[in-house]
Image (tube, helix red, strand yellow):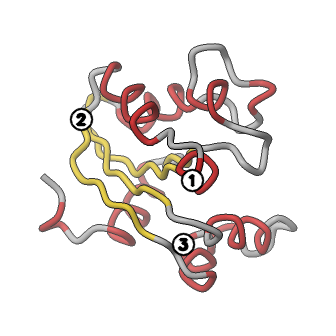
Amino acid sequence: MVQRTLSIIKPDAVKKNAIGGVLKYFEDAGLRVAALKKIHLSMEEAKRFYIVHKERPFYNDLASFMSEGPVVVLVIEGEDAIARVRQIMGATNPKDAAPGTIRAAYAENIERNAVHGSDSEKSASYEIPFFFPEIEIH
């Protein structure tokens, strides 16, 4: 089934100039970038985006990290895109990420892990419109 999912190239990977490298992983897997933009989230925007984690101890640190520099937000489209993007990203902790995954290549640690990807259709249905009106997705 063709799906759309959201991915974010996080501030650590943007700072490393890894935008093109991350995009190549997705495109080489046959996925299509349907929308893309570079933005700088405010602390408030980052907190609103990650509201699902509000009760978790890492919530404020995550929001702070995500607002420390520019990010690249992407809508990725393709067959089973949600699961495939998560597989391409690799495990959240780069120490556990398989070789050949984005996090194995670019992540520093479990907090600075280079990329975000929607974890379900429900998440994607919230996350995509957070950043992109339908008119910007092609």
- Mark 3 and mark 2: span between their CA atoms? 23 Å
The quarter of the picture where residue 95 lies is: top right
Residue at (21% x, 47% y) in the render: 34
Does residue 76 appear to the left or right of 16 in the view shown? Answer: left
Residue 84 on image: x %, y %: 43, 28
Q: Find residue 53 and report its image quarter.
A: bottom right
Q: What element carries label 2?
A: strand
Between 125 and 44, the one nearer to me in the picture: 44
Secondary-structure class at tag 3: helix
Outermost residue, right side: 57
Answer above or below: position of 128 versus 94: below
Name the residue that disc number 3 marks. 49
Residue 26 x %, y %: 37, 29
Image coordinates for residue 111, horizontal then vertical, percent = 77, 51
Q: How far apart are marks 3 and 1 (CA)?
A: 13 Å
Mark 1 or 2, nearer chain start = 1
The residue sitting at 57% across, 15% down in the picture is 100
Q: Is mark 1 on a helix, strand or loop?
A: loop
Residue 32: numbered disc: 2
- In the picture as drawn, the residue positioned furthest to the top comes out as 99
Front disc: 1 or 2? 1
Judged left or right of residue 137, residue 6 is right
Residue type at mark 1?
Lys
Question: Disc 1, disc 2: CB below 8 Å?
Answer: no
Whichever of labels 3 and 1 marks the residue nearer the N terminus, that label is: 1
> Residue visible at 43% across and 56% down?
72
Q: Where is residue 24 in the image (x, y as percent from the top left)?
A: 37, 27
Q: Label 1, on which residue? A: 10
Q: Residues within 10 Å of mark 3 (few under 14, many from 20)?
A: some
Left/right of residue 76 with respect to residue 106 in the rendered view: left
**Residue at the location (68% across, 71% down)?**
63
Residue type for callout 3: Phe
